[in-house]
Image: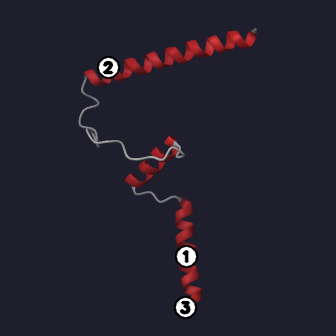
Amino acid sequence: MSDHIETNSDQAMLRSLRNLVERQIAKTQATGGLSGLKGEGKPLPYRSAHEDAGQSAGMRMMVEAGVVPEEFKLKQALDAARLCCIN
């Protein structure tokens, strides 16, 4: 029975959060805060169904900021070392 109460509580909390988010979006729209954003009016970029939305957003932000993930730097260094050793 406590599971049922917890589930109802979770649903109520999610509903409250959703309402808060909707109010914040409406408020921002009303003040013009969502106008003129980069990519406005353009379709969303293609994303595979298997791709994680959060990870995609993070990678896109890194690319736009010119940040190279550490594993990419390491791969570049390994590739350069391999070329050096081959020649």
Mark nearer the N terminus (1 vs 2): 2
* C-alpha distance separating marks 1 and 2: 51 Å
Q: Position of residue 80 (x, y in %)?
A: 53, 78
The residue where tag 3 is placed is 87
The residue where tag 1 is placed is 79
Using residue 16 as the reference point, say whether residue 64 is left or right of it. Answer: left
Which labelled disc corresponds to residue 69?
none
**Which residue type carries mark 2?**
Lys
Quarter of the image for residue 84 reads bottom right
Q: Position of residue 18 (x, y in %)?
A: 47, 19
Quarter of the image for residue 23 reads top left
Q: Residue at x 38, y 21 (%)?
A: 24
Q: What color scheme is it? A: secondary structure
Q: Secondary structure at mark 3?
A: loop
Quick check: 26 above or below 4?
Answer: below
* C-alpha distance separating marks 3 and 1: 12 Å
Mark nearer the N terminus (3 vs 2): 2
Which labelled disc corresponds to residue 27?
2
Q: Position of residue 11 (x, y in %)?
A: 58, 15
**Which residue type carries mark 1?**
Asp
Using residue 26 as the reference point, say whether residue 87 is left or right of it. Answer: right
Quarter of the image for residue 87 reads bottom right
What residue occupies the far bottom of the structure in this picture?
87
Quick check: 87 above or below 51?
Answer: below
Mark nearer the N terminus (3 vs 1): 1
**Which residue type carries mark 3?**
Asn
